[in-house]
Image: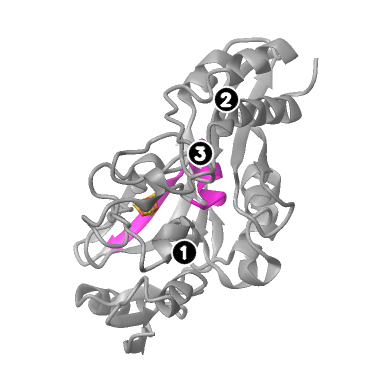
Amino acid sequence: MHPFAFTKAPNTRAALEAGRHGGRYIAGGTTLVDLMRETVERPAALVDIGALPLREVTVTERGGLRIGALVTMAEAAAHLKVRTLYPVVSQALELSASAQLRNMATIGGNIMQRTRCSYFRDVTAACNKRAPGSGCAALEGVNRTHAILGTSDACVATHPSDAAVAFAALEARVHLLGPDGGRQVPFADFLLRPGSTPSREQALRSGELITAVEIPAHPRPLKSGYLKVRDRQSYEFALTSAAVALHVRGGVIREAKVAAGGVGTVPWKLPAVEAALLGERPSDRLWAEAAAHAADGARPLQHNRFKVELLKRTVERQLRIVGGSR
Ligand code: SF4
């Protein structure tokens, strides 16, 4: 591990000041410390933001749910409002990592976590995300777990977060605070596709701090859930996953929110699936027809062609679980 400076920010102002001078924010540290040990990340200065007042889950004036950036994954998953209003979020969190990690890792850190591409973590391998311009060892290497959607010639790594898939499905917003004040960014715009600059992963400005993730009010109550398919049943990242939220009234689907994980370079919203569901009557046939669009635009690699069919089946199954079998 390389030497680094470490400070504890007593308040938000001090944190922003340290961030303005290049300090990297650290909260649970469950990703960053690992990466520093492996010398993948070499920050010169860390700023511990654990003392900031960002640890509450609150209902907003408009009826949305605001989850503070320092709320741990375990706390968010167990929160009554999260469990009752958005089970898709609590299920995604509970299917992530291990209990020990969920007790440490925060919501802000969860959406900031970096890819599990093994070449990214191997400092001897070519990796445009870690070392811009060095190439991408995964393109011709072992790429079974890599992305089939949103890829570029520069990078094909998946985003590893499950909670981010649920947030994408629900069209959450990320609250940011920086030297120039606060702003909100739609979740779909917060995490960036690799394009030709895979080392740039979030739409963060210099020194900005995530303060919360807000799920907007959904006036029509949603029935929701998260399905994760992986090589083993615990402590494993998704091969495919599906976040589904539906509102059915009078036998007709009035709202449909669907996103997929384990397949995209960012959590992958599925507007074609949503469009196929809206205004239709739930049926097994509809679930299959809608899910057939889940892999639209996919560009599989040598070892991950199986994800195209697996993704469609994952989405179909989760539509049936949430919407019912008919
Ligand atoms: Fe690096 Fe992305 Fe290629 Fe993995 S897929 S080696 S993270 S550039």
- Quadrant assignment, res 247: top right
Where disc 3 sits, the SS reads: loop
| Residue 15 within the segment the image draws in magenta | no
Residue 182 visible in the current orientation: yes
Q: Is residue 252 above or below residue 242?
A: above
Q: Residue at x 47, y 24 (%)?
A: 271
Q: Residue 165: x percent and y percent?
A: 53, 43
Q: Which residue is mark 1?
A: 109
On residue 263, which mark appears?
3
User: Residue 77: horizontal and vertical position, in percent?
Assistant: 66, 57
Task: Tell me where residue 17 appears, x and y as whole percent.
Answer: 23, 78
**Front residue (pair 255, 198):** 198
Identity of the residue drawn at 53% across and 24% down: 294
| Image vertical order of residue 129 relative to residue 49, above or below | above
Dot 2 amino acid type: Ala
Looking at the rendered structure, the secondary structure element under dot 2 is: strand
Image quarter hosting the C terminus: top right
Q: CA distance from mark 2 to mark 1?
A: 28 Å
